[in-house]
Structure formats: structure tokens, C-alpha cells
Image: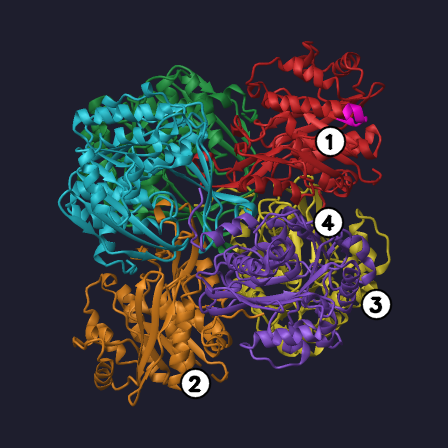
Chain colours: A red, B cyan, C green, D orange, E purple, F yellow
Amino acid sequence: MIAGRKHRVVTFGELLMRLSPPDYNCFVQAQQAGIFYGGTEANVAVALACMGCETSHVTALPDDFTGDAARGHLNRYGVDTSFVIRNTAPLGIYFLEQGIVHRPGRIVYNRDHSAFSAIVPEVFDWEQILAGTSWFHWTGITPAISPGAAAALKQALKEARNRGITVSTDPVYRSNLWKYDTDPAATLREMVALSSVFMGGPAEINMIFGTSFEDEHFTDAAKFLMEECPGIKSVTQKTRSSVNASCHKIAARCWDGKELYVTEAVEITPVVDRIGTGDAFAAGLIYGMLHDNIKGALEFANATSVLKHTVPGDACLLSAGAITAVIRSRFSGRIIR
Amino acid sequence: MIAGRKHRVVTFGELLMRLSPPDYNCFVQAQQAGIFYGGTEANVAVALACMGCETSHVTALPDDFTGDAARGHLNRYGVDTSFVIRNTAPLGIYFLEQGIVHRPGRIVYNRDHSAFSAIVPEVFDWEQILAGTSWFHWTGITPAISPGAAAALKQALKEARNRGITVSTDPVYRSNLWKYDTDPAATLREMVALSSVFMGGPAEINMIFGTSFEDEHFTDAAKFLMEECPGIKSVTQKTRSSVNASCHKIAARCWDGKELYVTEAVEITPVVDRIGTGDAFAAGLIYGMLHDNIKGALEFANATSVLKHTVPGDACLLSAGAITAVIRSRFSGRIIR
Amino acid sequence: MIAGRKHRVVTFGELLMRLSPPDYNCFVQAQQAGIFYGGTEANVAVALACMGCETSHVTALPDDFTGDAARGHLNRYGVDTSFVIRNTAPLGIYFLEQGIVHRPGRIVYNRDHSAFSAIVPEVFDWEQILAGTSWFHWTGITPAISPGAAAALKQALKEARNRGITVSTDPVYRSNLWKYDTDPAATLREMVALSSVFMGGPAEINMIFGTSFEDEHFTDAAKFLMEECPGIKSVTQKTRSSVNASCHKIAARCWDGKELYVTEAVEITPVVDRIGTGDAFAAGLIYGMLHDNIKGALEFANATSVLKHTVPGDACLLSAGAITAVIRSRFSGRIIR
Amino acid sequence: MIAGRKHRVVTFGELLMRLSPPDYNCFVQAQQAGIFYGGTEANVAVALACMGCETSHVTALPDDFTGDAARGHLNRYGVDTSFVIRNTAPLGIYFLEQGIVHRPGRIVYNRDHSAFSAIVPEVFDWEQILAGTSWFHWTGITPAISPGAAAALKQALKEARNRGITVSTDPVYRSNLWKYDTDPAATLREMVALSSVFMGGPAEINMIFGTSFEDEHFTDAAKFLMEECPGIKSVTQKTRSSVNASCHKIAARCWDGKELYVTEAVEITPVVDRIGTGDAFAAGLIYGMLHDNIKGALEFANATSVLKHTVPGDACLLSAGAITAVIRSRFSGRIIR
Amino acid sequence: MIAGRKHRVVTFGELLMRLSPPDYNCFVQAQQAGIFYGGTEANVAVALACMGCETSHVTALPDDFTGDAARGHLNRYGVDTSFVIRNTAPLGIYFLEQGIVHRPGRIVYNRDHSAFSAIVPEVFDWEQILAGTSWFHWTGITPAISPGAAAALKQALKEARNRGITVSTDPVYRSNLWKYDTDPAATLREMVALSSVFMGGPAEINMIFGTSFEDEHFTDAAKFLMEECPGIKSVTQKTRSSVNASCHKIAARCWDGKELYVTEAVEITPVVDRIGTGDAFAAGLIYGMLHDNIKGALEFANATSVLKHTVPGDACLLSAGAITAVIRSRFSGRIIR
Amino acid sequence: MIAGRKHRVVTFGELLMRLSPPDYNCFVQAQQAGIFYGGTEANVAVALACMGCETSHVTALPDDFTGDAARGHLNRYGVDTSFVIRNTAPLGIYFLEQGIVHRPGRIVYNRDHSAFSAIVPEVFDWEQILAGTSWFHWTGITPAISPGAAAALKQALKEARNRGITVSTDPVYRSNLWKYDTDPAATLREMVALSSVFMGGPAEINMIFGTSFEDEHFTDAAKFLMEECPGIKSVTQKTRSSVNASCHKIAARCWDGKELYVTEAVEITPVVDRIGTGDAFAAGLIYGMLHDNIKGALEFANATSVLKHTVPGDACLLSAGAITAVIRSRFSGRIIR
């Protein structure tokens, strides 16, 4: 990994407050909660900022002390918030009861009428926002939230294309989020076509394109996708095999149009916090692709995701140097004095 | 105060989750929050249950772990929850940044689309709910929340009248809660007319009846109210004079149609938690009126409110015996071994 | 598992306060302790109430704020406490230093002169308590505590038999608890004879009947027991094989007079809280037998016990639906959004 | 105050575990408790050790991890525990619900069958314990606890007299502690006669000698006492006037047989922890009398007591230098950098 | 107070880690500490950023995770850290034992060999740092720390003068900080001469200029200063009168060359955190002078300082709007919903 | 293991404050830290005191409240601190970010100018300190800290030799600690020659003697050492094989000049706190050698080290009885009631 010049990465999406009881308490027995802030795209921004990138996260927050606190979270880790807008709708919230061993984690959302869901596309001046930007990252959560969010994202993608900005996507489809009248697959399809780095595998491709690739036919699915969307230059996927809530195995694979790259699987026991491990992967991949070749980027992405499982909260907070050192130590976890 | 037989008191209204940072932290600097549950009518039910009454609180909670936890709060202090309904809308929330000295407390609400606001009147079988009940208590918060909440309350009031149940009201008018198209004053007027114990003073009477009594003309206002609403048998008001967020003085006055009763003012320094001090007053008054004459009841109500300022959370948690002992000790605060 | 109508289950036994330092602190270094409440029979009641059963726990608590708090624990999770009596003796206490890996957990008791040990049989009106009850559960802890406790239990068992109530027992023998002059084996024998669901295996049968079945001759022991006590209709046992304090394997076996049922073993790593895992098994078995056949009940009991290892405190707090979902997911621990 | 050579002070009495919920939580709502250790004589030892004296506390603790932790508390602040005996009875406990403003603090004890109550006089070798000792301090709590405790104390007092050791007493009479068959007044009378420094006033003298001095006749009462018990050389009393649980005023008076000394009253608002403020006074007086004249000692004692109101836990933890600095600053509370 | 355009304010000085035990624990009894970050100039930057100004703080931090965390503190509240340098010396630390009532707060420093003390002037490019800046603020702490710090500050002051930037100073003299061989008064004199807004009074003027103005001759002292340093355009001072550690009275006075302005005194009881109340005053004054006339600025500064006494940590975290609202409410502390 | 008479063990070295965020928080996200005290030699003293030995730790602490608190730590666990000197330099500190799974723990030190580094040999009267002592323990950390520390240690070693005291050493070489101008190997060589119990293996021998034994040639290295330093009577080494930060395997080997002893390896998952596990080994070995033969001592040392991995903080806090019980239970971790 070569430390290069600073790249500016822009992300766009909802930032939620997370409330989770400490010490694996069930929610019904808890009398206090940790306050965290997270959102799939914001987590990518935070992780990239901690790695050393210049990042800006675009979102909408309420114009009250919860919005101030959420913005403070982004700033604290070095994410620019100049383009965050404020309105009178409330902050989206999720309650997380952490899982452990055989007891699954459980999430309750309160985000249907959030500040982010209330946005209209006009509030964002993408020309200004994307000036000087190298990379734009979006996920399938944003267009699911509201027509306004989907429309704003589409404008961002067009502006990014016009400017030749690299666009990456984690086009995750979460069915219970799509509550307005639209065709999710069509919406995502259109947006994927405007992107070049696809983070997903057969399941995502099947959902978006109505295909039925099996999980082991990753390369076939990737090739299909690249034919359908010629803008896509690489297909990368983190794969997870979980024994239970406390024991996961993480690996990654990538098809770059020419070659298949696969990392070794790494087992994480015990898992400290699995929220945002996919976002950490995305951040690692973006950082890696900005500073290394695809093989190095894949390894870096996988290590970032592995390490995020050990970091409380929604985002990986390690520097690029720290992640690289872990890779070099072959994940030994040896204390650093 | 004579310990009598158990009376059943029913309350109806929204139960919210309260999240407040510890140790007077500003919200922007907080990383954890205490989880509390409160709502003006529920607080009355909890306080009465702790005093020793049989109580049942009627509300709507989400059918998820946040709803389970909220119900657990009521049960813990002995409030019956058999008539709580569950739906798929989220739990109303309020964030409280505690004030201290000259820094005011601040509240941010997230309750517009809550489980309680989503109720339709049909879900409550008031005949069954009010069977065997001596007292029903409502406040001006409930009809403000949604047309469904107002309609359900109206049905409850009618059923209570049919059964000869004593109805008390704290007809507080909170302007920023009334978001649907209606005439708040007219709505409250109609409901007050169905009640017999009115907790409020000139300000509330002015708002509801369009009068302009000054604060010192409490008796005149009370007389006017009793003429307008012959069902009202007493008008009782807690008065607060606050030096700052940490120093309040509390007193109470009551016109029972014949005589004016006034308590001494009690200064509370430092205030631990001012939320729910009015609800504690209401609970104290109800308990007092069920077990004592109006003079004793007023004193008991005032003491309950004073003591609530020292109890963390939304409701007074003291037994009737403990409150009576404080009155007898003349608020000395002497340790009990 | 078919969700059926509500069954009323009554349990009887001591409820203790548990004080345990957080974060695996040794007691000598701790300056704070979590406050929990537990007792083997009360844990069964709490777990059943969380599953959805109607339950009532019968016990004695001090008439002070520690007793109020202990009762609040039961109420919070929906257990009826109408038949809890209050006296002037103190609450039984146990201090728990949580074990981890090779460091064993350690318990110090302070219960010899507790409120429960001070009971006399006359204070309980079992006719009233057991009215409308489907199931009564007792354990070998209760008769060990004091002659009064043993006598009260005997009366309960007789009343239960008269009413045809199903009686289950976890006849655990804890030698250091039996401090009064009696023959523990004879006492337990008499009580087991009044029960129909026996939760235990060769060790318990050997202790009570003076036999010497080896652990692998579970069926023989069960057959012997059923001959000795024809009222016993099933013998069920949770088996534990622990690698160390953080790694246990749990399985269950049952002889119902006709067939031997055995579940798969489930390994739990890391164990969060092993206290009450046997009580969780009992609760699961009772719930299962009330709603399913013996095979389903055994599986449900085993899963409940497995999951309790992940829940802080003394009782399982999961709903029947949540437990069933874990069984269906084959213990995958996958997050539920 | 002149820093002199080290004096050895021996104290004798029960050491209890204190459990109190944080942040003025009511016990019924608390899920955690601070663990403290205190006892009126042990608090004197701890405070004196922090001031710079050599001290040894004699008591009985259980031979388990609660006893280890209690001993660790004494050691931590420099108190010698070589003469602490260990037995199998449990540690005495008290639960403290902190009071604030008008809500009184409340204490629930669990000490009737404690390790200390189980002592027999033979376990203490007072000759060895009191070797090289300048001062022995006892209080009226110890003889109240059990016949064994009273007998052991009597032996200590006799040995102290034989050795010419100064003996001070805070002969507090707590009626609900005396549960065995004896005449408390006679017992205390005999012990007071073996002492020379009496910390108490008219109320204590009346109780012990059956007199009826009014509170304002302090000097008369002191003179009477000195006539009755010629060994008593000074009578010193801390007087408290409390507005409520958060606002106390503290002053002190002393009759040394010749002159009456009175300090100014100091108001403490808000009180942080009033437990042990009398013990702090005793420690301050002992330290003062060992290092200064009676006037200086009285001032030092009063300041120590005032400062203890601001220290969480049962004992004053300030050095003699820090206390003297506060006196010099005239209680200004100005920050020290 | 008129909300105007954004002004850029630059501050320069050491940022320390503060470690203070919670809940008024004495340090000797504490097992945990809150982690805070503060420094007199950084506190000004944080407060101004929270008010709404653009600010940049210039300092040196260690190139390790403590430095990352300290920088994160600044970023979190919106302070730019682009000009923070990193080196290998450790972070300065101060341990704070919070005082309460008559127990004084106590501070232990560990800063003699800190990252900031190790700076050499060459590491700061003041031309670049001060570009586009309206205001530069320094205090008497910085030149005391090391010759390098003093030299760097001098360069900054010269560059500020060249650019016509308003320079404010709080020329506090803390004698135990000046450990290198220099003449503190001469050093400060030279720097004050390069400033225009002087925050201090007779004591500071006397120290720096060797005069002996009495405290009540504020105007005379201010006039003298303006004659000595014609660049000084206003002399403003916060005055504090403290009853004890929990009760302070704050007022402010200002001489602007023409008129004397004095605010009313405001009593703060109880004080939550007195650290940084002078810095809050400075921030309020700067904000006020950037947006209002001197009278309004003085009031705003005083209110900011008053409110800081209620905010945990080293800096005021309130927005300009919130402070203005408190002034308008006449410090009523009334809750804001 | 035979409980024998009390032996006095003296240790000498720096005691640092450890600050580590709870719950595996990264330092950049933490707002509170646990306060611990540790130092490699002090940890040995604390562990031995908990086991039941008489111990005295010799060090230098600042004469302020941080020094008081550090001394309190030693006293609390029974370590004598009569020979601790106090000076005006600050307490050494280390910040620990706990590692977990693949995320390595990280330490930042602030100890270069600490109270201990400032010592001069004259302040310690080794004749008095070592009177009545059976064992003296030192490590390679002490001579690395400063010339004064090295000189003081040399004097102690000479006095110990004169008195025939057994001297053990853990001659760890930490290169980044040796900041003054000296030859570390020569310094250590000289000191090892004055010792008789060597805790280390090929790596340490190679470093000190410039040899190049491979790790598997432990016996050869030990033999070489014994030839070089005829005073060395045994060479003992703890070996660690770590899978990652949460999974370590611990074993031990010993050459006593005649025979090689090797323990079984014990796997610890999850590791709670790996700091001080080597010191626990040393303490176990010393205790074992004082009470048992070398084989028993090695097993005891290994078990102590294994158990330390489960104890939060820097030192093992278990009694010798508890450790022996774990060995007897074959590390089963079974709960002790």
C-alpha cells in the first residue's frame, strides 16, 4: 500500500442515531444505552477519513441538538459536513439489541419520517458538492428511503458521470425499506448503470436483473453484469459465513474483467460489533483502489472488514497504517508498545 | 391520611421513551443516555400504583422490544397493562437535555407518527376497561395527538359518565402538539364538561373559554368555570415560581366551590428532575381525594409534587406512607434508618 | 410450537438479590455491582411470563425498599405477585464473582436468616393461590431452606394434587443449604412422589433413593423412578459438559415411559451468564409441554437453556416466538432487522 | 496545627458493606449500586490514617471474598488490619438510598447475624493489640451488637486503662440495635467511666444517666458527667441543624472542665454524603488533640466534619494538610493548582 | 445580537487531556476518570465554533492515538485542525479532582515535556495560517510553556499585526508555569503591545507593568494600560466572587476608552464545572465584538461565562442562539420544548 | 502446595498509572478510562501479597494525589509501602487501548520524566529495606529507565548478595526504554550475575550474552547461562503462542541444572487482560519455589499466568488457595458456591 496524495471521496445517505444497551443486555432489561451514529454511506466516509482520505458526507439532519450531535460525530473523525442540510423532521433512529452466540442481534427502526426521507432534490447543489472529487459512493439504501432521496441520488450520479468521477455502489436491496410506489429493481438498475465499481455478488445481480445465478457462479454473474452495464469495471464481494452471532468468517472475491481474485477467509471470534462491517469493506476497497492494485485493494478491504468486527460502533476507526500493519502481521493481534 | 380500601384508577394516554444523557452532559457531548419511560397520564398511574392504588394504564405501544420494555416499566411499578394495545408504528420518543442553574433543559420530540397517534377508537372496549373503576384521569395532551386519540378519549369520557366514575383532568394546552385540523379550545371545552376535578388555573381557563382572568384572580376563574361546566366540583392548581432550572418553589391552591385552600410554598434546591412534577401533583391529588378531605388532599398533592423534583425519571415512586412521613417531618429530609 | 391459550403456572421459592461486579472484575477490586434478582423457581416464573404464560410467584420478601425492588423485578416481566407476603426479616443475598475461561465463578451467600426462611406455612392460602392453575413447579432448594419452607411446600403439593394440577420438580440437592435437622432424601422423596414431571437424572435419583445408577444409564434410572413414584410421567434432564467457565455444551434427554428422546448438543462460547440456565430449561420444558408434544418440548427446553447462557441476569427474557425462531434458524444467530 | 510524630490509634467495631444506587436513584428503580465499606469506628481509623496517623482497626470479617474486599478497603487508606479476625458468618450490609432536598435518605440493615456479631471475647489478644498505642476509640454501636461484642469491648477498655491509653468515646445510643437482653444505659455507663474523651451532649448524657438536661444546657450536662465519671476530661459535641437532606449547618462545642469553646457554624449546600460526618468529627478531634490544644482541635474536628459532607463514602479521605489549608482559606473552596 | 457573516478566528496554544473522576470522587478512591480535552486557547476556539464562527486552532499534538483523540475533540465541535502539527513528545495531561462546597478542586499537571512545549517556531507558517483571518486570540499560558512556544507566538503576533487582524489576549500570569530563564513581565508586555483587546484587570496590569492599582480602580488601570500600549482599544474583565466551590458570582466590566460598562452579577449555584469559565468569557467577548456593540458584547460574554459553569468539560458548547435566548429569558432556566 | 510460614519478598521498580477505555473502545472514541496501577515488579508484589506472602514494594511516587492513589493500590492488596519515597516529578503513565481478536492492543507511554526515573541511589537505605527479607525480585525494565534507577538497583543487588537473599530476575530487554548512554547488555549481564533465579529463555540469553541460541535449544542456552553466571541456579521460561489478541496458549519450561521440566500448554479464549501475565508467572514461580519443589512451582507459576489472563488490571489477585484449586480442578472453571 503506497501512501499517496489525498483523494476527495463524497458519500451520500442517511445518518441514523443508534441506541444500544451495553454488555449484551436485552432491551427489556436495559436502563441505559450507548449513543452511536451510523449509516451505511456515512460509515464509509468515516472509515475513509480515519484512513487518511479527504471525505465529505452529504445528508440531511434535523435542526436541533440531535442533528448537532450527529454532525459532530462526522466531524470528530474528520469528515467534512459543509454540505449537510438541516430541516425540521426528526433524526432517524435504530435500536440495536446486540446479539451474542446463538441469540441473534435485533434491530427496531424509527426512520420512516426522518429528516433524510424528507429531502427534495433541489436542496443539493451537486456541481458544487462534487467539485474536486475523485470518488462518489452510494448504496441501495438511499433510493429505498423516499422518492426525494432517489431523485437526489440520480442527480448526483449524473453529475458524477459528467465529471468523470469514479462511482462505486453497494446496491444492497432491503425489501422492507421500499415503502413508496416504485420498482426497486428498475431503480437500482438505472443507478448501477451509472456506476463503475460494483460491490455485490450473485444475489444482488439476481435481484436487480432478474437472473438466477447461484452463489458459486460469481464470475459468471459478474461477467453478465459487465455486459449489461458496460460502465462496471469490477465486481467485488465480501462473503460471510457465520457460525453464530459471535463467530463469523470473512473473505472477499473480485472479478475485474480479466481475473478472479480471492482472499483467504479470516475467522473472527468473538465478534464485538458486526454493524458496518460491509461498509468497512467498501471503505477499504475504495482506499485500496485509490492507492494500490486490485489485488492489494481486495486484501486491504477484507482486512478492514475483519477489523471492523472488533470496533464498537458503526464505522471502522483505524488508520490505513494500522490496517496495513495488521495485514503484515498476518492478523496476529500482537500488542504494539 | 387514612389508608383505605384499594381504589381502581384508570388513565389513558401516550407513553414515550425518554433518552437523557447523564451528569448534566450536553447532548452534543454525550455518548450514553439513560432510558426512561414517561407520559403525563402514565406518570399519574405509576405514582398512584407506588402509593398503593390499583391502577390500569391504557395506551398503544409498538409490537417490538421497545414496546415490551415500555410495558415492563408500567408493570414494574404495579400498573396493570391488560388494556394496552400493540401496533406496528414506532414508540414516541423524547430526548431530554437536563437543564441546570441558568442553562435551560431542552426537549426534542419524535412522536408525530407514534404507535399512540395511530390508534383508532375501535381498539378500546371502554365498557370492559372501566368496569369496577372509581376514577378516570385524562390530560390535554391526548386529544392534541391525533383525531383517533381525541375520539377514543371522548368515548372513554362518555362511558365514565355513564358509570358515574369520577373524572379528573389536567387540560394542559400545548400548542405545538395540535397538528391536525381542529379547534383545540372547543375540543377541550367539550371534554372538560364531562369531568369533575379540574387541575388548572386562570391560564388554562382562559385558553379553553376565551376569557382573560389574571393569575391572581384564581377564585373568580374557578367560579366562572364551575358555572360554565356544572359538572366541575373543584378547581385545583399547582403554582410554580422558578428562580432558575435548579431552584423552584411549589405551592398549590384549590377552590372547591365553597372555600379557597392554599398551601405553603416549598423551595426545592437543587432540582433533580422536574419532568413529571405536575403529574405527581395530579397523582397526589387523586390519592388525597380518594382518602382524605380536600385540605389534606391539597397538602398531599403538593408534597408529592415537591418530592417528585428529587426523583430521577418521569414519575414519583414513593409510597403514600413515605409521602405522609415527609409531610409530618415538615420536609426536614432527615435520614430514616 | 402452537401458540395456545394462556395457562396459569404457579411457582414457589426464595427470591434473592444478586450483586455482581461488572466486566469480570474480581470482587476485591470492584467498586460497583449490578443489582439483579433471582431464585431458581422465580426464574422459571419470569421466563414463562416472558414466553407468554400467565404466572404467579409465591414467596416472602422484606417489607422495605429491598423487598419492593425485588417484587418490582417480578412484576416488570409480567409475573403476578399478589400472593407474595412481606415480613421483617432481610432479603436473601448472593454475591457473584463471574467466572471466565479458567477462573471459576464464585458465590458467597447471605441467606440463612432471610425473609423466606422465616415463613410459617399458615401465611399461604394455597386454595386461593392455586385456583385456576394448570401447573405448579417446585425445586429442591425450597425444602432445604427451613422447616417452615418445607412445610409450606408440602401443603402446596397436597393442594395441587387435590386439584389435579400438573406438578413439576427440579429436585436439586444442594448439601450446604440443608442446615436444619432433617433427612433431606426422605423429604425430597415424599415430595417427588407428589409430582409428575421430574427434571433430573441418575445423580438426583441416586441421592433421593439411595441408588447408584451411572450417568449413562439414564433410562434405567428413569424407569426405576417411575416404578417408585408412579405419579412421575416423564423424566427429563439437561446435561452439561463444560470445557471451562466460558465454554459449555448443553444437551437434553427425556424418558417418557415409552421412548428416549435426545437433543443434539449445542456449544456456547462465550458464556455470558450461566446462572439460571437450568431454570431456563425448566421453563422451556413447562412451556413446551403445555403447547407441544414431548419431542418438541425437549427441543424447546434445550434451546431456552442454550439462550439463557447469553442473557445477563438470572432468568431467560425471550418470548416463545423468539426462541422458536432461533430453533428454526438452527442457532445461526443471524441478525433480525 | 503542628505536624508531630506518628501516634498509633486503635479502633474496634463492625465494618459493613454499604450498597447505594448512584445519582440519587430510588432503590426500586436502581440496577446498580456503588460498593462502599464503612462502620463508625472504622471510619475514624480510615480518616486518621489519611490524616497521617498510624492506625489499626480491630474487627471480624467473613473468610470469603467479601471479607477480603472489606479488609482491602482498610488497607487501601493505610489502616493496619493485622488484628482483624475472620470467621464464617456473613459481612454486615446496609443499603443506603441517598436522600436529597426534602426526600430523606433511607437505610435498610442486614447485620443481625454478621461476622462481627458472632465474635467471642477470647479471639482478641488486647495486650498485643494495644502495645505501643496512644489512643483507643470506641462507640455506642459496638456494645449494642451482641453480648460478645460488648464483652470484647469491655476487655479492651480495661487493658487500655491499665496501659494509660487515652480512650475516647462516641457513646451513641441507637435503640433499634440493642436486640439482646441487657440494660443499654448501664452498659454504656460502665464503659464511659473507663474513658476520658466524651463526644456527645445533653441527649447522650440524659440517655446514659437518666438525667434531663436540655440541649442549651450543654455545660451543665458536661459538668454533671465529669462529676459522675471523673475519668472524663473533656466533653465535645458536634451540633447539626439541617434545613433538609441537602442543606446542613455544622458547629461544635467543647467543655474541657474549665472553659466552653464554640466554633462558628458552617453551612454545607449541597451535601454530597452525610454518612460518617460524625465519625469524621471524632477523627478530627482525636487528631487535633494529639497535635494541638483543645481550641485548635475543636476547629480541626469541625472542619473535618464539614469536609466529610463533600466526600462520597463513609470516611473522610483528606490529609491533615488539606484540612488545615481549608481552615486557613476560611472554607473558600478555591481551586488548588 | 445580529447574526452576521462567518468570521474566521485563529487561536494558538496547548491542548491538554483532562482526567477527572466522576461524581465528586476523591482521586484516591476513584477507579475511573472522564476523558476531556482542554486548553485555554482551544476552549475559546471550541466555544466560538459552537456559537457559529469559523475557527482554527493551532497547536502541537503527539503522533499517536492520544493525539488523534485530542484532534478529534476539536474537530467534533467544528474547529479546523489543518494547522495542527504532530511530534513524538507526549500529550500534556492534567488530573482534576473536582471541588464541591468547601472542598477545593485540585489539579495535578503533567505537561512539562509535552508535545506543545517541544515546538520550534519554524513549524508554523503563519502567513498561510492567518490568511483570511479576522481575529487572533492568545493567552499568557503560551509564552510560559517554553522558549519555543513564546517565539512561535511572537511570530504569530507580528504576522497578525502586518495583516491588520484584531488580536485579543487574556494575559494571565501563572507563576508556576514559567520554568525557563526569562522575564515573564517583559515577555508579556511586548506581546500585549501587539494586541488590541485586553482581557484582564488591575491584577494583570500590575503584574505586567509593575504598577499597583487596586482592584476597585479598574478604570484607572485601564487608562494607564491604554497609554502604555496605544494599540489596546478596550480592557474587559470578568470578576468572580466565590462563596465556595459550588457557589460563584460572576460579573464583567469594560473600559473602551470612553465609557465604563458593568454587567449585573449572576450567582451560580451549584457550579457544575468551573474550568474554562474564563475562556468562555473570552469566546463570548470575541463573538460579541464581532457581531454587536461593546455593551451587547459584554453582556454576551458574561452570559457565556455564567453558562459555562453548567457545562461539563473545558469549553462552552452552546450556540449563539441558545446564549442569546438565556439572556432574553433573564437567566430563568425555563425548560425549552 | 504446602502453606508455609510467611516469607518476606521485596520488589523494586516503577509503578505506573494505566488508563484504558472500557469495552474495547478505541481510544479515539472513548470518553472515559479505567484507572489502574501497574508496573512489572509491583505486579509481582501485589500477586504475592494476594497469594499470602509478606511483600514490600520499593519505588518513587509523586508527592500529590496521583502518588497517594498509586500507593493506595499497593496497600489495598496488602503490599507494604513503608519504603516508597515521594518526589515532585510526575507519575509515569501508560495509555492502553485493549486489543481484541485481530486488532492488536496498543500502548502509548508517558514515563520519560517520571518520579521513578528521577531517583538517585542515596534515597534508598537497602540495609533497612532488606532486613528480614527472603527474596528480592528485579526486572530488566528498571535499569533501562535512568542511570539513577540502574545505580539504585545495583546497590540493592549487592546488599541482597551480602545478606544471602534469593534474587530472581525477569531480565526483559525493551529496546525503546533504554534512552540514556549505556550498554544495556553489559548492564544486564552484571546484574544477572548477582541473581540466582533467571526467568527467561534463549532470546533473553542471546540479547545479554551475544549468543544465538534458537528457541528450541532452551536447555543448551540455560546450561550456557549457568556456566557464565554460576550464581544462577535455575532458568525458567513462560512460553506464549498467540493465535490472536483474544486467544493465547501458555506453557512453561524450566532447567534446574539437572532436569528439564515442561508444563502442558493451556489455551485461553477469550483473553480478558494480557498485561502482567508474565509478572503473574514470576509471582507464581517465587511463591512456588518458596513453598514447593521446582516441578510444583513451575505448574503453579503457569497456572497463575493462565489465570491472570482473566483478571482485569495489571496483577493477579487470586489467593494461593484459589490457584491451587484451579490446578486441582484441571482448569475446569466450574462455579464455586
Front label number (2 vs 3): 2
Looking at the image, do the residues carrying marks 2 and 4 touch, with CB atoms under 8 Å apart?
Answer: no
Q: Is residue E231 visible?
A: yes
Q: Which residues are magenta?
A: A160-167
Identity, as a three-letter code, of the amino acid under mark 1: Asn
Residue designated by label 2: D292
Task: Report the side of D271 relative to E59 (left or right).
Answer: left
- Whether A127 is drawn above or below F155: the answer is above
Q: Secondary structure at mark 2?
A: loop
Q: On the image, which quarter does residue F330 sit in?
A: top right
Give the position of the C terminus of chain E as an image quadrant: top left
Between the C-alphas of marks 4 and 1, the distance is: 22 Å
Residue designated by label 4: A336
Q: Nearer the viewer, residue A137 or C122?
A: A137
- Which label was assigned to residue F181? 3
Task: Report the side of E233 relative to C201 (left or right).
Answer: right
Looking at the image, do the residues carrying marks 4 and 1 touch, with CB atoms under 8 Å apart?
Answer: no
Looking at the rendered structure, whether the residues under marks 2 and 4 are on a common chain is answered as no
- Which label was assigned to residue A302? 1
- Whether B236 is drawn above or below D188: the answer is above
Q: Residues within 10 Å of mark 2 (few under 14, many from 20)?
A: some
Looking at the rendered structure, whether the residues under marks 1 and 2 are on a common chain is answered as no
Task: Report the side of E284 relative to C190 (left or right).
Answer: right
Callout 1: chain: A
